[in-house]
Image: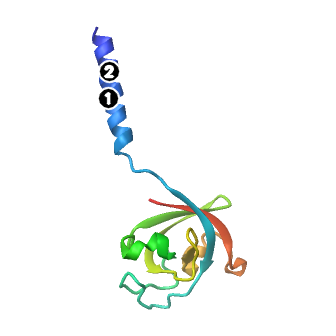
Amino acid sequence: MFKAIFIAVLAAVAAVAVSAAPASADFTGDATWYTPNGGFGACGAPSQNSDLVVALSADQYAGGSNCWRHIGVHYQGRFVDATVVDLCPGCASGSIDLSPGAFQQLASLDAGRIQVTWDFE
């Protein structure tokens, strides 16, 4: 009897933990790079080229509701964690614009445009 109750309690706890976990939405798109040069991004703070920052498409920027969130970007086994600081009006949904510092964690700046996957962390 104790074993059956214990298993039922564990199952209930697991169900609550799963339902409370945030859903991870993966995005796929092009990643390009831009030079913030100390300018103020759409989120209202200056960023440097060496900062690990990103500008999102209008869809993912969501009117600024994703400012300061972190995204994890993956490319050919490499990873960078970047902070949302800006809007990329020319980016298609799912595409991102990285600072040189963030882009170079994934590929050479000479690559210019790479296909990445990313998600909100």
Residue at image coords 34%, 44%: 20
Residue at image coords 36%, 26%: 11
- Which one is nearer the viewer's eye here, 108 or 2? 2
Tell me where residue 9 appears, x and y as whole percent.
Answer: 29, 24
Residue 83 visible to an observer of this rendering:
no
Determine whether, in the image, residue 100 is placed left or right of residue 53. right
Tell me where residue 75 appears, x and y as whole percent.
Answer: 64, 63
Badge 1 is on which residue? 12
> Colour scheme in the image?
rainbow
For label 2, count other residues whose C-alpha is less than 10 Å away and answer few (under 14), some (14-19) or many (20+): few
Determine whether, in the image, residue 57 is placed left or right of residue 41. right
- Which one is nearer the viewer's eye here, 20 or 110? 20
Above or below, 13 relative to 80:
above
Q: Identify the image quadrant of residue 31.
A: bottom right
Badge 2 is on which residue? 8
Location of the C terminus (image quadrant): bottom left
Determine whether, in the image, residue 72 is placed left or right of residue 44. right
Residue at image coords 52%, 81%: 88
Marks 1 & 2, CB-CB < 8 Å contact: yes
Tell me where residue 42 appears, x and y as whole percent.
Answer: 41, 84
Number of marks in the rendered image:
2
Local secondary structure at mark 1: helix
Q: Amino acid at mark 1?
A: Ala
Q: Amino acid at mark 2?
A: Ala
Local secondary structure at mark 2: helix
For label 1, count other residues whose C-alpha is less than 10 Å away and answer few (under 14), some (14-19) or many (20+): few
Location of the N terminus (image quadrant): top left
Q: Please tell me the numbered disc located at residue 54.
A: none
Q: Identify the image quadrant of residue 44.
A: bottom left
